[in-house]
C-alpha cells in the first residue's frame, strides 16, 4: 500500500489492491466471512485514470515529486472520476449527521447533551463553524437529525425526515441500538448518500454533530482493531483529567460488556454505536457504491469508515482523510486504514470543519494537475 496517498491505496495495480488489514482480534477477520456479500461489491476507482494522472504529474514543469502529497491527492481524484486530468471539484455537498448518545449522562463531555439540539438549530440558521466554511468554499450543506434527543418540530421538516430514534443506549450498560435500528440507520445513511449523488455532487463531505459522540466512536475503533480503551480515548470536547479517566472507564466497560459480539460489524454497531454513527456507515457505503468520493472529517467519520470497511473493504478507496484530529482513535484508525490526512492543524470541532478546511487543498491539487504547464512545452527546441 502506498502510504503517501491522502485517501487510498494506489489504484494503478491490476487487479486492484486488497483492502488494508484491519488488525482485528479474531483470526481471519470478518473479511473472510459471507457478510462481505451482504451488499453490492464496490467497483474500485479507475486504475487507468490513476496511471495517466501519475504520468502527467511526472511530466509537469517541476522537479519530480515537488508537489508532495498534492500529487497523491490529484491522482486520487482522477481515479475516482475516471478521467485525467480530473474535472474541478465544483459541486461539493456536506451532510452533517446529528445524534445524541446515552453515555453523555456519564460525564464524558465538557458540555451538556442539550447542546446537540441547540447546535442543530444553529446550523439551520447558518451560524455554526461548518456554515461559515461551507459559505466560504461554495459548499452546499445540510444537517439531519438522525438521533437527536430533543423536540425539533420547530425546525424545517427536511431536517427531521431521516430520524431513526431519540438518543441511543448508554453503551457501558446496554446496547446502543436494536438490530432493526442498526439496519434502519444503515439504510437511512445510504438513502442520504443517494440523494446527494442525485443532486449532482462530484465530492461528498461527511460531518458529525452530537454531544458524547467521540465515546462510541472510540469504542468502535477499539473493537474494530482489537486495542484497549486507553489507546483510543481522547479528550473530545476538551474534558479535564478526571473526565478523561471516566470516559476511558466507560469505553473499557462498553468493550467488556460487548465482548466477542463485536467481531460482527452489525453487532458492533448495535452494541457500541449509535443511530447517527450507523447512518454514517451507510452513507459511506452508499457513496462508494455510486462511485462518488468522500472527504472525511475527524474521529467520528473515520470510525464509521473502519466499520464500513469490515462490511465492504472497497469503500476505503473512495475516501480521503481531510485532517488529523487530536483524538488518538482517529490516528490509530487512519494508520490501520492506510490514510494520510491532508491537514494537521489541531482541529477537534467536528461538524465537517476539518474536511472543509482541507477542501481548498484538494481543489488546488486538481487545478495544478489540470492547468500547470508541461516541462516539454517549456523546453527550448532542439
Image: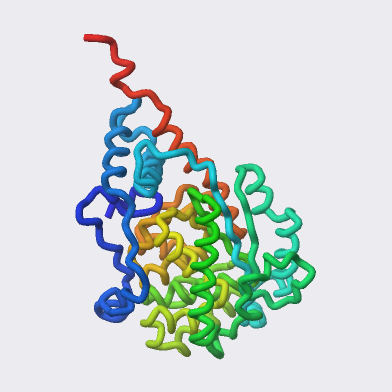
Q: Quadrant of residue 94?
A: bottom right
Q: Say if residue 321 shows up in the picture.
A: yes
Examine the rendered structure and indicate whether residue 288 appears above or below residue 375: below
> Which residue is at the far right?
154
Examine the rendered structure and indicate whether residue 329 appears above or below residue 249: above
- Where residue 259 appears, as percent x and y from the top left, is 41, 88
> Which residue is at the far front?
198
Question: Which scheme is used to colour this image of the protein?
Answer: rainbow
Rendered residue at 42%/71% (across/down): 307
Rendered residue at 44%/61% (across/down): 331
Task: Look at the image and tell me in which quarter the C terminus lies.
Answer: top left
Examine the rendered structure and indicate whether residue 66 appears above or below residue 226: above
Examine the rendered structure and indicate whether residue 251 appears above or below residue 206: below
- Where residue 116 appears, as percent x and y from the top left, is 69, 69
Rendered residue at 62%/82% (across/down): 102
Q: Quadrant of residue 234?
A: bottom right
Amino acid at each position: 500500500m502506498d502510504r503517501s496517498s491522502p485517501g487510498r491505496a494506489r489504484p494503478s495495480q491490476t487487479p486492484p489492491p486488497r483492502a488494508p488489514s484491519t488488525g482485528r482480534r479474531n483470526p481471519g477477520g470478518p473479511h473472510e466471512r459471507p457478510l462481505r456479500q451482504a451488499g453490492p461489491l464496490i467497483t474500485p476507482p479507475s486504475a487507468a485514470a490513476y496511471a495517466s494522472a501519475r504520468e502527467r504529474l511526472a511530466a509537469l514543469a517541476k522537479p519530480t515529486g515537488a508537489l508532495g502529497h498534492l500529487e497523491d491527492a490529484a491522482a486520487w481524484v482522477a481515479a475516482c472520476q475516471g478521467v485525467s486530468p480530473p474535472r474541478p471539484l465544483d459541486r461539493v455537498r456536506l451532510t452533517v449527521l446529528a445524534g445524541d448518545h446515552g453515555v453523555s449522562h456519564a460525564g464524558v463531555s465538557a458540555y451538556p447533551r442539550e447542546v446537540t439540539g441547540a447546535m442543530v438549530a444553529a446550523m439551520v440558521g447558518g451560524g455554526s463553524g461548518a456554515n461559515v466554511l461551507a459559505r466560504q468554499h461554495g459548499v452546499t450543506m445540510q444537517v439531519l437529525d438522525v438521533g437527536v434527543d430533543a423536540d425539533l418540530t420547530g425546525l424545517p421538516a427536511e431536517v427531521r425526515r431521516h430520524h431513526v430514534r431519540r438518543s441511543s443506549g448508554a453503551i457501558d450498560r446496554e446496547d446502543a441500538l436494536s438490530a432493526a435500528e442498526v439496519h434502519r440507520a444503515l439504510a437511512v445513511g445510504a438513502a442520504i448518500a443517494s440523494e446527494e449523488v442525485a443532486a449532482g455532487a462530484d465530492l461528498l463531505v461527511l460531518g458529525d454533530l452530537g454531544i458524547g459522540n467521540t465515546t462510541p466512536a472510540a469504542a468502535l475503533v477499539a473493537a474494530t482493531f482489537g486495542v484497549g480503551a486507553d489507546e483510543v480515548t481522547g479528550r473530545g470536547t476538551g474534558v479535564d483529567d478526571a473526565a478523561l479517566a471516566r470516559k476511558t472507564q466507560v469505553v473499557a466497560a462498553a468493550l467488556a460488556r460487548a465482548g466477542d459480539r463485536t467481531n460482527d460489524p452489525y453487532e458492533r454497531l448495535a452494541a457500541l454505536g449509535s443511530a447517527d454513527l450507523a447512518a454514517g456507515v451507510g452513507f459511506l457505503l452508499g457513496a462508494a457504491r455510486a462511485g462518488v468520493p468522500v472527504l472525511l472529517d475527524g474521529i467520528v467519520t473515520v470510525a464509521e469508515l473502519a466499520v464500513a470497511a469490515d462490511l465492504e473493504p472497497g469503500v476505503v478507496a473512495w475516501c480521503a482523510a481531510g485532517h488529523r484530529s487530536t483524538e488518538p482513535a482517529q490516528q490509530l484508525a487512519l494508520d490501520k486504514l492506510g490514510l494520510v490526512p491532508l491537514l494537521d492543524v489541531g482541529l477537534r470541532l467536528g461538524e465537517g470543519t476539518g474536511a472543509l478546511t482541507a477542501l481548498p487543498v484538494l481543489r488546488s491539487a486538481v487545478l495544478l494537475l489540470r492547468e500547470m504547464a508541461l516541462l516539454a512545452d517549456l523546453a527550448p527546441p532542439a
